[in-house]
Image (cartoon, rainbow, N blue to C red):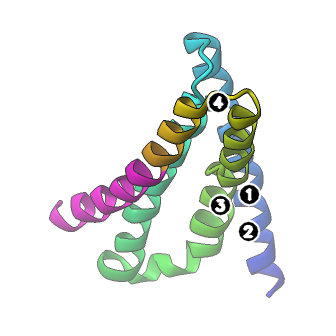
Amino acid sequence: MLLTYSMVAMGGALGAVCRFALSTLINERLKTLFPFATLSINVLGSMLMGVCFVMMTERIPTLETYRPLIMVGFLGAFTTFSTFSLEIVSLIHQQAWLTALSYLLLSCFLSVLGLAIGILLTRTL
């Protein structure tokens, strides 16, 4: 049990650092009100979750051992749903209604699509 918690903690630390680095890089390059960094990270994280799901449950079941490290820890910390929620509320407070709504809809749709693509790609490769 201690090993499992350690795996979650290590994966979470790495996922958080990767999220911060990628978010910083995207925000420095785009400089826009629309939160493209969080959207991109959520879509990428969802796609990777789909890939990992198929790999661990269908392709290489022995990888299931690493689920706490990769899916719970790394991807759990890498994706940013709480940040996403805060950004929507912030956009609403700025009365950027169209930006808030488009961000909400795009994030949900593209993240689910990313997960489905990850599953499909991994099953077909």
Quickly name the residue at label 4.
23
Query: For this rendering, which residue is in front, 111 or 122?
Result: 111
Residue wearing tag 1: 12
Mark 2 sits on what residue? Answer: 8
Q: State which region is magenta.
A: 108-125
**Tag 2's secondary structure?**
helix
Q: Is residue 78 magenta?
A: no
Q: Earlier in the sequence, mark 4 or mark 3?
A: 4
Count of numbered labels shown in the rendering: 4
Give the Cα distance between marks 3 and 1. 7 Å
Q: Is residue 56 left or right of residue 71?
A: left
How far apart marks 4 and 1 lie (CA) works out to 16 Å
Q: Are the two marked residues, 3 and 1, in contact with CB atoms closer than 8 angstroms?
A: yes
Asked if disc 4 and disc 3 are in contact, CB closer than 8 Å, the reply is no
Q: Determine the CA span between mark 4 and mark 2.
A: 22 Å
Could you tell which of marks 3 and 1 lies nearer the N-terminus? 1
Which callout, 4 or 1, points at the residue further toward the start of the chain? 1
